[in-house]
Amino acid sequence: MTEKEKFIAEILDLVKQPLLPGQNPINVTEENIAELNGAPDLNTAIAIATNLFGAEYVDQYALRKGYEPQDYQSVVNANILGVSPYDFIGVTADQPIVYGGQATTIGAQPGNFYQEGDQNVFTSLLPEEVRELQADMVNAGLLGDKVGKPFRPGFFDIKVEGEVIKQLMGQANASGLGKAEKGYQNVLQLYLDNPVSSPVEYKPYLPPDYSAVSNSVNGLFERELGRKPLPYEKKLLADQFLEDSQLAYEQAIPDPLPDVTPDTLDDYGNHTTSDVPKEQIDPGANLVETFNNITAKEQERLGTNRDIQATNRIILNSITGAPR
């Protein structure tokens, strides 16, 4: 039995009994009962009962329920004036929605839609339940340092998680999805399916100028061996440098983090995508290493004794245009 139905049953029972000695009981007609039953919600039923039977009976009902009559009457008066006593999250009572296939408003189904304070019930969740909710929020892109909302695993903070839940409830209300339709859960699932991405910008890949790479290869051979490179040597080293440069760029873009689980919340933000650090590609060092490999015998014959790091630096500076 709904709250409206309980109210109608009790108010009809009350009006059968005179409030004062010698007072005649109120004659309740079938039309009166039909009008009460036709009320879309509890507040409207209260307003109708007030008009039919008088405010004193509603006051008696309020006292039975533990309310102060004036508080209950203020709800009735607000309803009569057309002002909703409800504080819906994210919407007003006249928010148009389609509910049950019919065009209506949020205020016509007040008990089903989220009101201010509903987000606070989550403070009674057990820590493990909070962690499950937090993991979903993080994976949805709604919680965590990356979106400016740090949190404490297992603790529901009204000012943090509460605001996220309030956002979800407001969006559910606006969509006509209430408690019966698992409104905020459905909205959260939409975020999980389409997470809010962090605004991360990566500079586009700009390959080194091929002529600059070729000139550096020429300079390396002339400086170390006193000759120009053979065509195949120049192509081998230049192509390798260009390929390594692109790999180094791609390597600098971090892999996406795995989904957060309740058990990994404490480590959130401290993940690594691999237990073994990636070996960073150094295009200049690889070029020098290949140069050494293909000219080892020639260098040995000439007695070359180079500073590998200095040579590597000279090559990179000549390509990037930095001072030597």
Image: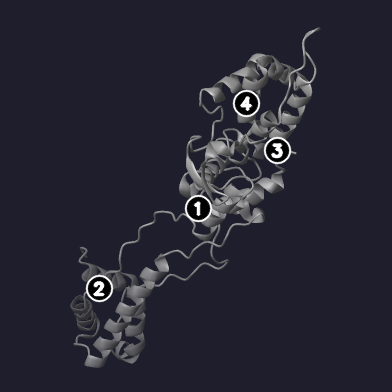
Residue drawn at (38%, 74%) of the image: 247
Numbered label attached to residue 124: 3
* Disc 3, SS: helix
- Mark 3 → mark 4, Cα distance in angstroms: 37 Å
Q: Amino acid at mark 2?
A: Pro
Residue drawn at (49%, 57%) of the image: 195
Whichever of callouts 3 and 4 sits on the residue coming sooner in the sequence is 4
Residue drawn at (45%, 63%) of the image: 254
- Residue 81 position, x and y percent, is 51, 22
Q: Amino acid at mark 1?
A: Gly
- Mark 4 → mark 1, Cα distance in angstroms: 47 Å
Numbered label attached to residue 141: 1
Disc 4 marks which residue?
Answer: 48
Q: Amino acid at mark 4?
A: Ile
- The mark lying in front, picked from 2 and 3, is 3
- Mark 3 → mark 1, Cα distance in angstroms: 24 Å
Is residue 150 shown to the viewer in this render? no
Left or right of 297? Residue 187 is right
Q: Amino acid at mark 3?
A: Ser
Is residue 247 shown to the viewer in this render? yes
- Mark 1 → mark 2, Cα distance in angstroms: 36 Å
Disc 2 marks which residue?
Answer: 208
| Quadrant into which the C terminus falls | bottom left
Left or right of 192? Residue 251 is left
Whichever of callouts 3 and 1 sits on the residue coming sooner in the sequence is 3
